[in-house]
Image: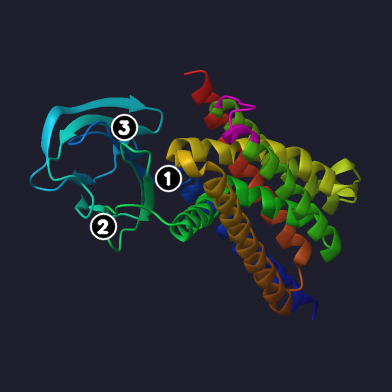
Amino acid sequence: MTAALSGRSTAVRLLAALVVAILGWVVPAAAHEVRPAYLQIDQTDDSHYTVLWKTPLLSGMPLPVVLRLPDDVKHVVEPLERPLPGSILQKRVISAPAGLAGRQIAFVGLQATITDVLVRVTWLDGRQASAIVRPSQPWYLVPAEQSFWSIAWDYTALGINHILYGLDHLLFVASLMLIVRDWRVLVKTITAFTIAHSVTLALATFGLVTLPPPPVEAMIALSILLVAAEAVRMERGKVSLTITWPWVVAFGFGLLHGFGFAGAMVDLGLPQRDVPLALLFFNVGVEIGQLMFIAAILAVACSARLIFTSGRSMRIAAAYGIGAIAAFWVVERLDAIFL
């Protein structure tokens, strides 16, 4: 029996080490490469439009997607490129005598990527429309106007995508779950985190409180590292504020994470006449995605308990893996601040 348990424990450690190694290889590269592209079209008179086309950088190279406008559209000002942190911005002025409503805009090459495109169109009379274009259908049919439900659906989907691709936010939630074992305390902790990041997301989106993104990103990575370290301390029998009152720490760091969500909202743009609506449903999408992640983690943990007996070793390995990734991000993001 002892030999069998020892063999299982060794297998668990090897499996955990393999998972950590894979995460360490994949996560740093993928953390910033799934941000959506962004197309903004603003009508300036009856037949002229200003077009902003922003594509993320993948391993230092622009996203291999080409913007294709309707055939009768003419360039008044040819595209001018400007590099931004993590992306390339093109600005051009076009002439469309027949207008753009009911016309198709294509994104050539999008189907070969995993990146979405957020599109926002503003007409001269203030009407707006926005949508998320997927690789499975790489074109956008410009509507005459947009309904309440269309905005709600688009920004809910955007929120879900943002949290599920936001590996730093997910790792913070995962590190909290390593500390919290009671489901009542888990509900309280996740609720505190949700309330906190919802508050700062709203404040930052409306411009009431702002923080520069690079330091915020570095502090988010540091928050993950600190909570992962606390998870290891807990397994060693230590006691601290985080271990005793995890919801307090979750609320404090949640305020910081809200600024990270707000940075994504600013990057992607908001419909000016429907900012509260878009903000509400973006936040709803974030919470849905967060609950999906928590449910998946709980399902995996329950399944692991049926197979393995060395739960403590798995928790320690997971904490060290999360901490190692977070430490890499801290160094990487601090380096980006001082470049």
Q: Is residue 193 left or right of residue 14?
A: right
Q: Secondary structure at mark 3?
A: strand
- Quadrant (top left/top right/bottom left/bottom right) for the N terminus: bottom right
2 relative to 155, above or below: below
Q: Earlier in the sequence, mark 3 or mark 2?
A: 3
Q: Residue at x 32, y 26 (%)?
A: 83
48 relative to 7, above or below: above
Q: CA distance from mark 1 to mark 3?
A: 13 Å
Residue type at numbered disc 1: Arg
Measured as percent of width and height from the top left, residue 117 is found at 35, 49
Q: Which residue is mark 1?
A: 35
Region rendered in magenta: 203-212
Measured as percent of width and height from the top left, residue 154 is found at 45, 56
Q: Which residue is mark 2?
A: 138
Q: Answer whether residue 240 is magenta in the image.
A: no
Residue type at numbered disc 3: Ile
- Residue 17 visible in this rendered orientation of the protein: no
The reply to whether dot 1 and dot 2 touch (C-beta < 8 Å) is no
Kindly report which numbered mark, 1 or 2, lies closer to the viewer in this rendering.
Answer: 2
Residue type at numbered disc 2: Pro
Q: Earlier in the sequence, mark 1 or mark 3?
A: 1
Q: Earlier in the sequence, mark 1 or mark 2?
A: 1
The reply to whether dot 3 and dot 2 touch (C-beta < 8 Å) is no
Q: Nearer the viewer, residue 168 or 194?
A: 194
Q: CA distance from mark 3 to mark 2?
A: 20 Å
Q: Nearer the viewer, residue 1 or 162?
A: 162
